[in-house]
């Protein structure tokens, strides 16, 4: 069959390595059907789903249950993360054997109760990951200090959205980045830092790389496009862990993108119900908001503005993540690769219409934003799965397993 692409750009489908689709146990927020429909409509053909569910994916049995639960619901291809907790090193081999894309390590408090703040536990988890050659993706914030600061701010009577930013100053991230890189190198684990958010954290990462540590890092679309002035307009909707920060941090992240110090961009698509997103007490509100469907239009808009090029967008949001996680057939248009393609109209200008989004709940800070660049058609392995806002066909997504790679360690 023919598909007319006159005047369009054809890009490799995006690979979003930081997505929370909430199965099992939190499906009032999102599920694999709704979340992967949002991905397909946004030109994202591979997602990596996070394990901070209810229950969390901490054992081989739970990984098997999750795979069974989601495998027939996906409209795009998906990788699944397992998780490192305080005492599950014995489970890691069984999780790896089922094709886990990696292991998530939450050093600090965030959605779900999955923290692993203890150094000895972290080290045992890193050793187990190293034995299996799995990438460890880390949420790097110092749990003990942020909890102390939350208690202090609460005691002072603060409940406003900015108190969240004050409870997670940049040194909380810098400290955790330093500690996890140090431990991962000693354990020989492959390390990826999710949602690096601060100028100071990025400086530390660059310095540690100069000492010979090997680590990749991602920036979020939200940390690149929003600064703390948005608390006044959006309140707790933009509560995010780590927080939306002052403009100076945002500028440092863009500079990190320009210099290549930040390797990739992801969304941290973290849905909550509209009622939860409207919570006015910052300590009761959840962190995170949706983003998988709006990543490509927002990044194309940045490209149209000249902040980066379209090929930068492809490298940051598709090619590099697919290579980092050794995803066979993903991230590139070339012989031997899957025909995961997205056709975009780079010139179309329109305001972002939140009511057309495919997630279960459509609260987004980007509603009404002027966009330039629209996703028209999405192909998954050669078949159209989305056209002009409509999902096409039954779920045809498959599990993506990382190609086994020799673990060269982190030095
Ligand atoms: C994420 C979520 O809701 O699952 N929330 C967030 O604020 N980023 C969890 C996470 O990525 O830390
Ligand atoms: Zn996180
Ligand atoms: Zn996340």
Image (spheres, rainbow, N blue to C red):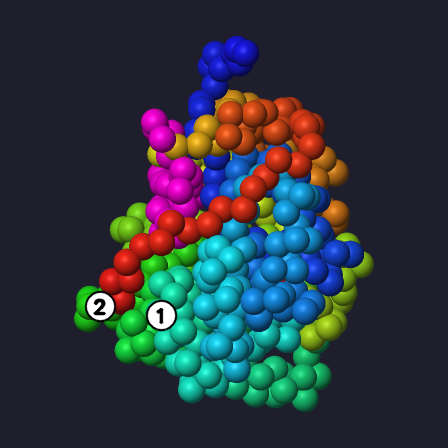
| Label 2 crowd bin: few (<14), some (14–19), many (20+), radius 10 Å | some
Numbered disc 2: secondary structure: loop
Kindly identify the residue that appears in the image at 46 percent across and 50 percent down: 401
Judge from the rendering whether residue 208 lies leftward or rightward of residue 377; answer left or right.
left
The residue at the far left in this view is: 211
Numbered disc 1: secondary structure: helix
Kindly identify the residue that appears in the image at 33 percent across and 73 percent down: 184
> Of residues 246 and 4, which is closer to you in this image?
4
Vertical position of residue 8 compared to residue 241: above or below: above
| Label 1 crowd bin: few (<14), some (14–19), many (20+), radius 10 Å | some
Mark 2 or mark 1: whose residue is earlier in sequence: 1
Stretch in magenta = 312-336
Kindly identify the residue that appears in the image at 61 percent across and 88 percent down: 152
Q: CA distance from mark 2 to mark 1?
A: 16 Å
Q: The N terminus lies in which quarter of the figure?
A: top right
**Residue that mark 2 sits on:** 411
**Residue that mark 1 sits on:** 131
Q: Position of residue 128 (x, y in %)?
A: 40, 74
């Amino acid at each position: 069959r023919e598909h007319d692409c006159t005047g369009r750009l054809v890009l490799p489908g995006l690979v979003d390595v930081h997505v929370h689709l909430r199965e099992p146990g939190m499906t009032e927020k999102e599920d694999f059907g709704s979340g992967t429909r949002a991905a397909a409509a946004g030109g994202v053909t591979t997602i990596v789903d996070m394990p901070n569910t209810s229950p969390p994916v901490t054992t081989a049995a739970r990984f098997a249950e999750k795979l069974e639960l989601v495998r027939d619901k996906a409209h795009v291809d998906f990788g699944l993360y397992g998780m490192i907790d305080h005492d599950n090193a014995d489970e890691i081999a069984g999780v790896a054997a089922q094709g886990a894309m990696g292991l998530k390590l939450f050093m600090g408090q965030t959605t779900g109760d999955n923290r692993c703040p203890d150094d000895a536990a972290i080290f045992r988890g890193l050793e187990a990951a190293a034995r299996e050659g799995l990438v460890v993706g880390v949420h790097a914030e110092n749990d003990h200090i942020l909890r102390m600061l939350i208690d202090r701010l609460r005691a002072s009577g603060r409940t406003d959205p900015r108190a969240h930013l004050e409870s997670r100053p940049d040194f909380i991230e810098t400290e955790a980045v330093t500690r996890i890189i140090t431990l991962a190198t000693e354990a020989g684990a492959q390390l990826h830092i999710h949602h690096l958010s601060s100028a100071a954290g990025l400086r530390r990462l660059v310095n540690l790389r100069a000492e010979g540590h090997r680590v990749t890092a991602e920036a979020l679309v939200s940390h690149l496009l929003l600064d703390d002035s948005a608390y006044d307009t959006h309140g707790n909707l933009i509560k995010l862990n780590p927080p939306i920060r002052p403009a100076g941090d945002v500028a440092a992240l863009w500079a990190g993108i320009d210099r290549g110090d930040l390797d990739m961009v992801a969304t941290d698509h973290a849905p909550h119900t509209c009622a939860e997103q409207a919570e006015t007490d910052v300590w009761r509100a959840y962190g995170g908001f949706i983003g998988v469907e709006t990543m490509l239009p927002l990044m194309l808009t940045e490209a149209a503005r000249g902040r980066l090029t379209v090929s930068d967008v492809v490298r940051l949001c598709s090619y590099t993540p697919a290579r980092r996680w050794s995803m066979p057939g993903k991230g590139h248009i070339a012989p031997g690769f899957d025909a995961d393609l997205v056709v975009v109209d780079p010139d179309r200008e329109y305001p972002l219409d939140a009511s057309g989004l495919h997630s279960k709940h459509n609260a987004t800070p980007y509603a009404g934003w002027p966009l330039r660049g629209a996703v028209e058609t999405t192909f998954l392995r050669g078949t159209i799965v989305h056209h002009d806002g409509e999902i096409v066909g039954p779920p045809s997504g498959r599990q993506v397993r990382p190609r086994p790679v020799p673990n060269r360690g982190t030095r």
